Image (tube, grey):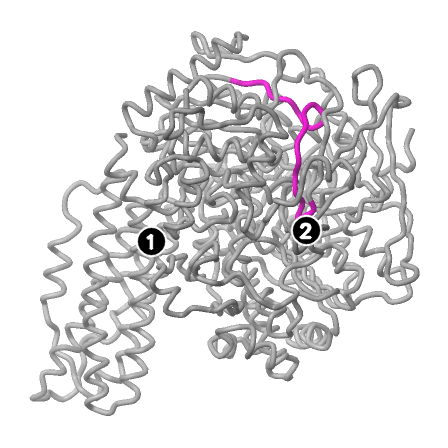
Amino acid sequence: MQTRDSIQNIWGPRAPYVGPRRWPERLDERSDDEAERWVQSCCVLCSNGCGLDIGVTGGRIVGVRGRAEDHVNRGRLGPKGLNGWVANNAPDRLTRPQVRRDGELVEASWDEAMGLIVENARRTIERQTAGGIGIYSTGQLFLEEYYTLAVLGKAGLGTPHMDGNTRLCTATAARALLESFGVDGQPSSYEDYDQADTILLAGHNAASQQTVLWMRLLDRLAGPEPPKLVVIDPRVTETARHATVHLAPRVGTNVAVMNGLIRLIIEAGHIDRDFIDRHTMGFDQLREGVEPDTPDRVEQITGIPADTLRRAADVLGTAERLMSGVLQGFYQSNQASAAAVQVNNMQLIRGMIGKPGCGVLQMNGQPTAQNTRECGADGEMPGFRNWGNVEHIAELARLWNVHIDTIPHWAPPTHAMQIFRYAEQGSISFLWVIATNPAVSMPDLPRIREILGKEGLFLVVQDAFPTETTRYADVVLPAALWGEKTGAFTNTDRTVHLSLKAVEPPGEARSDLDIFLDFARRMDFRDQDGKPLIKWSDPEGAFDAWRACSKGRPCDYSGVSYETLRDSSGIRWPVTEEHPEGAPRLYADHTFGTDPDYCGSFGHDLVTGAAYTEQEYRSRDPKGRAILKAAAYQPPPEVPDVDYPMMLTTGRVVYHFHTRTKTGRSKALHDAAPDAFVQMNAGDAARLGIAEGDLVEVETRRGTVRAPAQLGDILPDHLFLPFHYGALNSPDRPTAANELTLPTWDPASKQPHFKYAAARLSKVGTLDKAKDAAGAAVGVVRSVAGAVASAVPTPGSGSKAAPSDRKLGDYIGMVLTSEEALAEAFERVGGRHDIEPGMKTLCDLLASWSRSHVEALGPVVERYSSRREAEPRRLADALFRGDRSGGLGLLRDLHDLWLLANESHVSWEVLRQVSLGLRDEELKAICGRCGAQNDRQIAWLRTRIDQVAPQALIVPS
């Protein structure tokens, strides 16, 4: 039985808004049999979090139906929600543990499997400390499981190496909220879309990624007061087709787009000056930061016509109720955090936050991604606590009754790509992968496969199905799915739902919570009084413990209980005495979470990712004001060239979720999208002699993929490839998009860049030749780049200015030499450690800053002369000696870079004082500009040293 065919009719019939902007109900249902009973739950196949009931007959799930009373979906369900439940009944479910014997995975008992895990965990801790253990989880567990995992990881094991695959999809959402508002947590709710008269969708293809939210927007558009829609997307998607203004930028240029829009809004006077003055800080810096991004410059960078940009700015600037949504088109692309923060900036300068129809949703990518961040099962601390605030860590220590030094807070949390790098180095030798499939979802898959199969790495994989990742495991633990266990989870707009157990898991499969509790018991984790560290034994007990942990924090669940969740269809946190029924939106009083004693982070430099210290943050105490942060546009680290002339971007399709582990086991969803495809511009296809459906090969410097061509709806010289498909889908040819993607990340959020890569395209049939050509091309490109670099004269050298008796020329010469040496050192270190996440990209950027400093001093050299001083070169020559491989080598290189950067720091301070004595305003401005960039270089080095040092010096590898 089905109310509609959601495969053919994705969004269903329209129900235009009536009355006071209330979304009408529509009940969607699909079942294979008549249900004997219906069990309360929520959909787990995107971050929308639609309320639904699970139909059960004979102890088996037979269907689902939407919950009409739920404010999130008003009874509607999308194609994945209506069809994805079939995976629970798939015949290839994992039903017994497996262990590796003689190179093969064989079934085993739970005692044997858990015994092996505990034995190896203890051996790793004894040999390497807890720093030898890494945990890589998911965005699909329940709140109770995340919190239990956080406690056993942070207070039981004491490992700093915990993250989830939410790093791949939602890390930038968290970082953008922290940078602007001081704490995580979405300011708005879905109901604000009911009130908005203008909506911005920034890198957010809602029609495909959040189908029920798109139904909401379609019903608004079909109603008597349709909102205006501005869409930023390089493709002509279904979302873009409904746009009032569609901005189609070149991939990787989102910051330029947002800066251009903000500049025009400020120039037109479409800002709320009173709100800015009373409730924000940093406006002057923002205004100065966007000043260079004129419409003409933005057109040159992005390809968006200047008049189209002006039209979009006028729509956004004149809105009376502006609502913005942001997703992966921004999060997974170049300058992710900087771009997402600019959306926050736009809302803030317009004063459109904290009131109906106004605000921003920095969307999540997975159903329970919000809970990973809240509970601290990823690179955060529970309750949105600040890992850099000692009192926040002390609160957790008191709550868990452990010594404060048990909780890892001596260095920044380790993020996913760094966890895999440590595993590659051998300093992590025990890796636990939970409900995720990195052998398909991580960037640069050839390298990830090598890491997963590395000799000496003990790999535990906990999943409900065999995947590309379970193939590498030493132990496989069969896990229960949604519908087979009880727990709560929270969607993008902070709505907490309860999902009740409807059926038993198959065979011996266990809930993730039961697995974690069993591990903690076998490891005998204890608190300071000798009592069990984890004091709960069921989901409700875990939830009550979480309520106590969250009390007083932004995500306050203290007023929520299983009883209230059973009696409702979702409630939005915070739920407190002040908000007993939850809060539809945050910041209604325009007081933000930026107080130094309360904030979840002291913030970062959006360009370099350098963390600000507590002292730096307190010196600029925001006092509850939101923070406006500017960021200059930086080109993507990899752009098309003569050998790889196209730009590849990746993403999702409407019928699948992540690596198809569940949706690929639903016949309806599989048949709707059974294979990968390469979307390309029709003009490019004609030029290359490619027709619709032709099998083509996409190649980057990292690998190849073969898939059918799909023509149209994308910019020229751009390609799109869905990332869902892996080796199990098409074993005869490579289809995983991440064979091609770069191992680079956003410096602030540490989210990988999946959205751009230089690529080339050809018809299949020349695969072997193409591979040979690729290797030759890489060599040619590198050789040409080296020749060009050596041929470029050093700016500022060989000055013909007249000699001077002043010693200033000597010092200017020393500064020039110092900056040149620093630039060369950054380039050397970046090249030497290019396999380290983010190193080469940032080192190249920071080197370019030092080279620009040499250029900047050109007018000064002409006025005051310069005589080269050899001392900085002698210092540089004395550094960077000996073995610089591995973690210790990286630390030594960072140490030496620190010394050189501080040498430059002293030089700029001296020149600044000289500029005052000479009353030379130009020199003063140069020192201010270059000195500020040098400070950022030093801050980045400090952050990287903090992160690298404990692992490099404590943990054997």
Position of residue 500 relative to residue 20, above or below, is above
Residue position for label 2:
493
Which quadrant does the C terminus fall into? Answer: top left
Q: Position of 765 compared to 215: left or right? A: left
What is the magenta range?
A: 476-495
Residue position for label 1:
943
Q: Of residues 731 and 526, which is closer to you in this image?
A: 526
CA gap, disc 2 and disc 1: 32 Å
**Earlier sequence position, callout 2 versus callout 1:** 2
Which quadrant does the N terminus fall into? Answer: top right
Residue type, label 1: Thr
Position in image of residue 418 (x %, y %): 40, 40
Give residue 177's quadrant in the image. Answer: bottom right
Q: At numbered mark 2, what does the secondary structure look like: helix, strand or loop? A: loop
Position of residue 806 relative to residue 121, above or below, is below
Q: Residue furthest bottom?
A: 919
Q: Of residues 399 and 686, which is closer to you in this image?
A: 399
Residue name at image x 59 percent, y 48 percent: 556
Position in image of residue 327 (x %, y %): 63, 53
Residue name at image x 90 percent, y 32 percent: 2
* Residue depth check, mark 2 versus mark 1: number of the one nearer the observer: 2
Q: Of residues 353 and 103, which is closer to you in this image?
A: 353
What main secondary structure does the magenta stretch of the protein show?
Answer: loop
Give residue 323's quadrant in the image. Answer: bottom right
Residue name at image x 31 percent, y 73 percent: 930
Position of residue 517 relative to residue 141, above or below, is above
Q: Position of 63 compared to 730: left or right? A: right
Q: Is residue 715 visible?
A: no
Q: Is residue 387 visible?
A: yes
Q: At numbered mark 1, what does the secondary structure look like: helix, strand or loop? A: helix
Asked if the residue under mark 1 is in contact with the one under mark 2, i.e. CB atoms within 8 Å, the reply is no
